[in-house]
Image: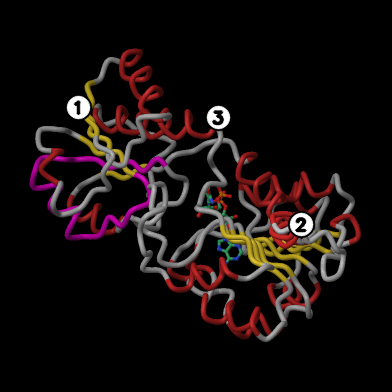
Amino acid sequence: MRLFAYALREYDELGYLQKMASERGFEFGWTPEYPTAKNVGLARGYDAIDIITSPMGADLLKAFHEVGVRNVATRTIGYDHIDVAAARDLGMRVAHAVYPPEGVANYSIMLMMMAMRKVKLIMRGNDSQSFGLRGKIGMDISSATVGIVGTGRIGATVARHLAGFGCKLLAFDPYPNQDVARIATYVDLDTLLSQCDAITLHAPGMAENYHMIDADAFAKMPQGAVLVNAARGSLVDTAALIQSLENGHLGAAALDTIENEANLYYHDKSRDVLPNHDRAILDSFPNVIVSPHMAFYTEEDVEDMIRTSCEALLSFDVSEDSPYEVH
Ligand SMILES: NC(=O)c1ccc[n+]([C@@H]2O[C@H](COP(=O)([O-])OP(=O)(O)OC[C@H]3O[C@@H](n4cnc5c(N)ncnc54)[C@H](O)[C@@H]3O)[C@@H](O)[C@H]2O)c1
């Protein structure tokens, strides 16, 4: 098999890919660039491409198919950036990565605690020696009611770890998980929104979930509630989020993912004017933490992103099933 990796980072991913290629005997090429119509030609002569979270729509898939690419793997758990139906129509197989849920789960809990304890305000104050306590009083996680939306691998891990803090847990998922039901109470989404001090999202960014947290949802949350989103930006209506923060209803937000982040993150943009107004507004608020989609970023997860995406492409290459295939 010959594999071409896009948006590959030489400082961490390349080493894992070289190790995997020499162990499993495949050839690869790579570029730090995201896949676009302009650089499709780089993958000519390769059987498969390995990508991350940049849009892979029908036209781009067709262009890759035309240069001979047969299979696509994303080094991410989420695959909403790939037009899977279009790939299927072209006869291309699609895979996603699977890695331990603990990294993202623990990062989400960290964000929740940082937001509840107003750490951004405290650290900003530190920079200007503003050590007063006024306005910095926090909410303790152990006495909070926390709502988990989506109790798949990551949400279930969040529930298990939060149980150790002693907080009251509510959960919502169309497919409840029996292990989670032992430590959390499943309720409908409206009940969860109206009863929780903090809400953390772990549902996938499928079309059905687009803006599931909209103006109505914010209105149902208690005054001062905290929202954490380390799932997908598309779950939250950003305009409604900004409005709820501006009118003082939502107490705080911690966002590892936001809308329109495609092709923005994982590059040094420190000299650029960024074309994302919402991100700039949100980042300016003292009660909003914005991180550049890096909840996954641990040694364990990066190694598994490379390993599982390559394993899937190796299986596809010999027409075998893969547990990582997206159906
Ligand atoms: N920030 C990051 O770095 C990062 C890293 C990995 C994954 N993610 C995101 O986290 C999401 C969850 O990952 P996972 O591994 O737990 O996925 P998963 O497939 O194991 O679980 C998703 C769960 O969400 C549930 N769900 C679907 N629609 C829902 C809805 N409308 N309301 C409530 N629940 C709903 C599903 O039934 C499922 O139980 C991924 O889809 C991905 O978008 C983010």
Residue interval drawn in magenta: 52-75
Screen quadrant of the N terminus:
top left
Dot 3 lies on which element?
A: helix
Task: Kindly identify the amino acid type of the residue bearing the numbered disc 2.
Answer: Gln
Is 57 a magenta residue?
yes
Rounded to the nearest angstrom, the CA distance separating label 2 from label 3 is: 38 Å
**Mark 1–mark 2 distance (CA, rounded to whole Å):** 56 Å
For marks 2 and 3 on the same chain, the one whose residue lies earlier in the sequence: 2
Q: Residues within 10 Å of mark 1 (few under 14, many from 20)?
A: some
Q: Position of residue 197 (x, y in %)?
A: 80, 69
Q: Nearer the viewer, mark 2 or mark 3?
A: 2
Percent across and percent down for residue 124 are: 69, 59
Q: Reading the chain from its start, which is encountered first: label 1 or label 3? A: 1
- Displayed-image quarter of ligand 1: bottom right
Depth check: 231 or 134 in front? 134
Q: Which mark is residue 129?
A: 2
Mark 1 in CB contact with mark 2 (< 8 angstroms):
no
| Residue 111 vs residue 44, the one in the foreground | 111
Q: Which residue is mark 1?
A: 2
Tag 3: amino acid: Glu
Image position, residue 230 (x, y; %) = 58, 56
Point out the residue furthest to the front here: 129
In this view, the mark in front (1 or 3): 3
Helix, strand or loop under label 2:
loop
Q: Is residue 139 left or right of residue 151?
A: right
- Residue at mark 2: C-beta within 8 A of ligand 1: no
Residue occupying the point 22% across, 36% down = 48
Q: Amino acid at mark 1?
A: Arg
Q: Residue at x 86, y 65 (%)?
A: 137
What residue is shown at x 36% (from left), y 43% (from top)?
74
Marks 2/3 in contact by CB < 8 Å: the verdict is: no
Query: Which residue was labeled with disc 3?
Result: 300
